[in-house]
Amino acid sequence: MKKTIILTLSICLFTIGIASAQIIPNFSFGLKGGLNYTAFPSNGVFNNSNRAGYLAGVWARVGGLGFNFQPELYVTGKNIKVKDDQNNENTAKFTSIDVPLLLGGKIGAFGLGGRFYGGPVVSFAVNKDQSIDDAANKATHLDYKSANYGFQIGAGVDISSFSVDLRYEGGLNKIAYGNDNSHTRVNVFSLALAYKLFSL
């Protein structure tokens, strides 16, 4: 009898915990940082190699009923090395301020859960450093815009105040390169660790 009562109370508490986590609106704010890998599809004109970059910034999350809205603001470094068929090489380093606006869902309770999300991102370039030394290397020059647009999709795991996110970003606007009206789009894969500073 006691075991039945304890089991019933445990189930009730677990159900209440899940309901509270999913129904009661809440607000969270925190820090994040991580690594990214950037690629520009070559379209058969030049070869490129992924290079590690970084991201660091803040995030907020407003949610209820199992859904949430997560705006973010972070600085990111996107690095790439491109080479054309004449062995002209360009090591490009782009620094930007990225603003993703993500919608998603969450499952779980008691500080442990999983998330999935997606949404648009706008990227404002603050540095567009490229190793273009002579006229020949202009064949690999990337015309990275001051404002770039894309979308992000990803998933994350929450463990107490910590989160781990794996994300893909696909560029929507064309980035011209070379002298023959060729274009490409940015692709970014990122892995980030986040920490929740507070939650209301």
Image (cartoon, rainbow, N blue to C red):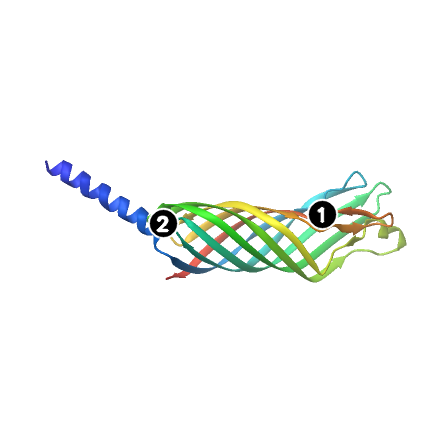
Q: Residue at x 60, y 54 (%)?
A: 121
- The spot of residue 128 in percent (x, y) is 73, 59
Between residue 141 and residue 121, name the one nearer to us.
Answer: 121
**Residue 176 at x, y = what percent?**
79, 51
- Crowding at mark 2 (Cα within 10 Å: few <14, some 14-19, many 20+): many
Q: Which residue is mark 2?
A: 22
Total count of labels? 2
How far is disc 1 from disc 2 in space, using C-alphas? Answer: 37 Å
User: Which quadrant of the figure contains the N terminus?
Assistant: top left
Q: Amino acid at mark 1?
A: Arg
Q: Is residue 5 left or right of residue 117?
A: left
Foreground residue among 13 and 78: 13
Give the residue at x 64% y 58%.
123
The residue positioned 41% from the left and 60% from the top of the image is 27
Q: Is residue 71 left or right of residue 130?
A: left
Q: Secondary structure at mark 1?
A: loop
Q: Residues within 10 Å of mark 1 (few under 14, many from 20)?
A: some
Q: Position of residue 58 (x, y in %)?
A: 51, 61
The residue under label 1 is 185
